[in-house]
Image (spheres, helix red, strand yellow):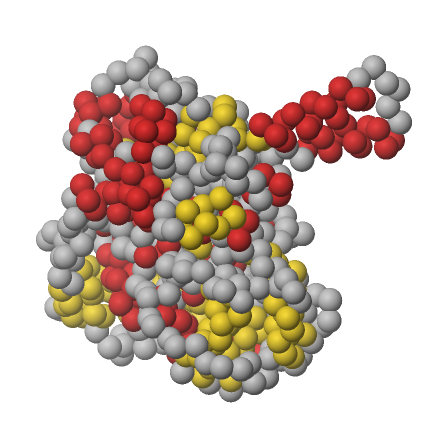
Amino acid sequence: MIRRYDYGTPLLTDAVVLSVEPEKGNPGGITVEDLKPGIRFTLPMTEETQLFGLGQAVRGIDKRGHIYRSWNTDDVLHTENKAALYGSHNFLLIVNPGDTLGLFLDDPGDIRWDLGATEENQIVITSLGGDVSLYLIQDRDPLTVCRAFRGLIGKSYIPPFWAFGYIQSRWGYAGEEDITKVVTEHRQKHIPMDGICLDIDYMDRFRDFTWNPKTVPDPAGMVKRLREKNVHVIPIIDAGIPVDENDPACADGLKNDTFVHREDGSLFQAAVWPGLCYFTDYLNTRCRNWFGDLYRPMLEAGVDGFWNDMNEPSLFYSRDGLEAAWKEIDSLKDRNLGQSEFWALKRAVDSLANNPEDYRAFWHDMDGQKVRHDRVHNLYGAGMTKAAMDGMHRFDPDRRFLLFTRSSYIGSHRYGGIWTGDNCAWWSHLKLNLQMLPGLSMCGYLFSGADLGGFNNDTTGDLVLRWLELGIFVPLMRNHAALGTREKDICRFSRWKDMRNIVTLRYALLPFLYSEFLKAVDSGTPLFMPLAFLYPGDTVACHTQDQVMLTEQCMIAPVYEQNAVGRHVYLPEDMLMLRMRSCTDMDACVMEKGAHFVPCALNEALLFIRKGYQIPLVMHDVESTVDLRAGLSFTMAGWKDAQPYELWEDDGEHVSAPVISRTLAPGRGADNRSGLLR
């Protein structure tokens, strides 16, 4: 089923776990052009062709009609015109009636995907470097192709059970006093919570693996005190190590030669939060292991979760770039700036960050093979993810740790999850969060999520509520905001009780969501998928861009427009609709196949259950995942004539923990007290 064709000199990327021997020649049905340098693949499309995948990308669920780029990019404005974001997930699913082709380009360099934007019925994929392994998977059924691809790239990362709980975060918590206040308020108001993320504020002068001695004087004590409240501390770690030999990480990195070099052998320097930094060569095994071991002191202090950031790598400026900018600015100083001079001044400043010249200025030692960074740019964040998880498992091989990252490449899905980066408090980004879920899931990123309520800009209470109503279904459920924006933890809003009630729904659903997560890891089935996967003969379902299947059992269709009192929903078959207001307040009704306007109050979340299925719910208040680990009673929601639900569980803590399956049906570990079976 899986075919491989090699072009140029492909690099080992760690993306693939199966050994597939390359075939000679070119694949039939694909035009291959050698661009010297580069390689171009052209495929025809019909009007019925749909395109899915590409992981983290803008626009709809169907990716047809836009030009995308695989080039990991720190971009704070995820607008429709953007070609690239933080991750490069080079898997495209080409779906025609009765035929599906999965196409994976294992190439960590720059790739352009023209998906019918230039020529309406043509796919044109260009690898600018030309060193690529092309994998093709063909079958009638897109789900079969997705499972085969997931088998090719390996099973997805499984975080600890507590990581599926609600997580609060903010750039701006000044220290332990702020952090403790947030946790105390959540507990006093009985808002369930399992984790709190620490942004760069906790560090000493923005330096990795340090704590600000004034604001966090007793890190281990703080972590212990919060764990006693069943709250886990999740610090951020950035990619840059400050250029300062008094910094322990810097001094040790210089001693062990772990940083990337320029072609002349000098160390590459560019600025991030602490100023000029060195950058670990994550593509080298020895250097990667060195960096992974830097997490150990924090692990010893009791930390069991991290989020890695700025690892595209994001560069504020380089030494060379800054010198060139100053030279240009000096040449314009004291002049009457006309149009061309003004734009030259603006370009001199705007071009400093993430300049392509800087990405061509340093080299990696890939275990003996010297490679210029731009050829492997999209691997850098993945290398950091692997470094971190490998380091944590050297500390404790059988323990599950929480890890999620901003930059990624297929393969890193085996070591950690991702969040979708610096989104905005825009209603369009709530919809974008929904639309990204199937593509990420197809590419193995099951543990993913977006910043609920939006990271940038001031949010509003109604947007936070509606976003929570999507977030209860998404594995990584984190509320995060930028420095200088409105504080948006739940306690800050007048409708905090409604928000709390929605969060309780997450915990009501959590055993079901965790069970389905484990099954998706095991089977390779996407956790989220387009309606087209299950209803290929239904034209309306195939082209629905704002509803998503949650496994094969349920459909989610959140309200994503401001001031809306409901939304239009298309049902490809009769479904049972759960209208949920809290873990103890929900009702169910059967809705017939077809188009409906479904009223949905601001404090309600909707879930649609397919005919023949039922799901378990925990219909009582809890304050953390600790309350979900033993002695649970379930209420079943769904169809009376459905097969009993198979619940998968493990201890939620250990890599080696066996999965235990048990059957839930009314009268056998579950009941129907709330009348949620129809």
Quick check: 24 left or right of 609?
right
Question: Does the image show residue 378?
Answer: no
In which quadrant of the rendered image does the C terminus lie? bottom left
Q: Residue at x 58, y 30 (%)?
A: 317
Question: Does the image show residue 69?
Answer: yes
Q: Nearer the viewer, residue 677 or 625?
A: 625
Quick check: 612 left or right of 30?
left
Quadrant hosting residue 325: top right
Q: Residue at x 62, y 43 (%)?
A: 356
Q: Where's residue 390, x and y in %?
A: 26, 47
Q: Where's residue 19, x and y in %?
A: 34, 72
Quick check: 45 left or right of 11?
right
Quick check: 249 left or right of 225?
right
Q: Residue at x 63, y 48 (%)?
A: 79
Task: Spot the residue most to the front.
Answer: 264
Q: Where's residue 287, x and y in %?
A: 33, 41
Q: Nearer the viewer, residue 150 or 132?
A: 132
Q: Nearer the viewer, residue 406 or 527?
A: 406
In which quadrant of the rendered image does the N terminus lie? bottom left
Q: Residue at x 65, y 25 (%)?
A: 323
